[in-house]
Amino acid sequence: MAHFTSLDELSTHEIERLIGRGLQLKQGAPVQPLPTKTVANLFFEHSTRTKCSFDMAEHHLGLHILPFETATSSVQKGETLLDTCKTLQAIGVDALVIRHGETGYYEQLQQQLSIPIINAGDGSGQHPSQSLLDLMTMYEAYGHVTGKTIVICGDLRHSRVARSNTQVLQRLGATVIGSGPREWFDETMGIAYRKMDEAVATSDIIMLLRVQHERHVDDYPFATEAYHERYGLTEKRMKWIRPDAIVLHPAPVNRGVEIAEALVEHPQSRIFDQMTNGVFARMAILERAFETSTTKETR
Ligand code: NCD
């Protein structure tokens, strides 16, 4: 069963194959349409990019999309996620794309379902499709990530993007460092902390994160301007970055907080390229889900 819940489940060979496939699809490689297959997209947390790019990827693959809205579903009557998924499986859905606020929600589901689950983000856990599109964007810039230094800046503790990316980048031979507020630095991620000025000046890839207000239990301790000055990519810091460095952000971007307004579309920013790449990364992921011969990988 080709679930896609965490990149940790895939061999490095399989990850590189998916990056390559995403890049080929972007170049216009032909696809094998899948019109006999039906997918449902279950988004229990808000989403623009991930949901719309999964929709777009599904359209490009000729998949049928079964409309599902959490707000009008029986989840509102107390039905569990497992029963919702089992219902969709019972009525003939062939794969489920799920975003859910509970970290690791998929662990129980993958034991109990016979159709693939594609994780579109779980709480503060994993965001493997985001990591794949981030990797595609890095490979477009450098051809690989081995030996590259990536700084991930901001709310690391609450970020599934930070967690997913750190794990896969380290496996692929990159050095990952963290920056941003010390109180949101996560020692369990196994990366070194650097102050923002030094971190941005010495990295090949600068990945900014949105503050995950929805996952905070304590009040937000910073005024917007203070956060930007201390931990954001300001216009001043931008002058120090390497000439070939690239700037990433999974978005949604809070302009003037994590990144200065004028830098979002700076020539070294790849933020909108990431969004474009998301469609092709997700096509590669969906193709894999429907490859009948795929068995669970060993690392
Ligand atoms: C991210 C997410 O939802 O984890 N967004 C996304 O998928 N592009 C990051 C975020 O919401 O800050």
Image (cartoon, rainbow, N blue to C red):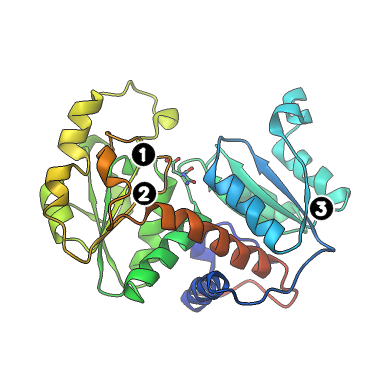
Cβ(mark 1) to ligand 1 < 8 Å?
A: yes
Instruction: Answer whether labels 1 and 3 touch (C-beta < 8 Å).
Output: no
- Which kind of residue does numbered mark 1 sit on? Arg
Instruction: Answer whether labels 2 and 1 touch (C-beta < 8 Å).
Output: yes
At a point 59% along the width and 43% down the height, the residue shown is 99
Query: Circle 1 sits in a helix, a strand or a loop, which is it?
Result: loop
Residue 262 or residue 127, whichever sits in front: 262
Mark toward the start of the polypeptide (1 vs 3): 3
Query: Circle 2 sits in a helix, a strand or a loop, which is it?
Result: loop
Reading the image, the residue beneath label 2 is 249
**Relative to 134, 191 lies left or right:** left
| Placement of 178 over or under 252, stated as above or below | below
Residue 120 or residue 193, whichever sits in front: 120
| Placement of 175 over or under 76, stated as above or below | below
Reading the image, the residue beneath label 3 is 93
Q: CA distance from mark 2 to mark 3?
A: 33 Å
- Which kind of residue does numbered mark 3 sit on? Val
Query: Circle 3 sits in a helix, a strand or a loop, which is it?
Result: loop
**Relative to 62, 25 lies left or right:** left
- Which kind of residue does numbered mark 2 sit on? His
Q: Position of residue 111 (x, y in %)?
A: 70, 55
At a point 73% along the width and 42% down the height, the residue shown is 82
Reading the image, the residue beneath label 1 is 210
Neighbour tally class for label 1: few under 14, some 14-19, many 20 plus, Cα within 10 Å:
many
Mark toward the start of the polypeptide (2 vs 3): 3
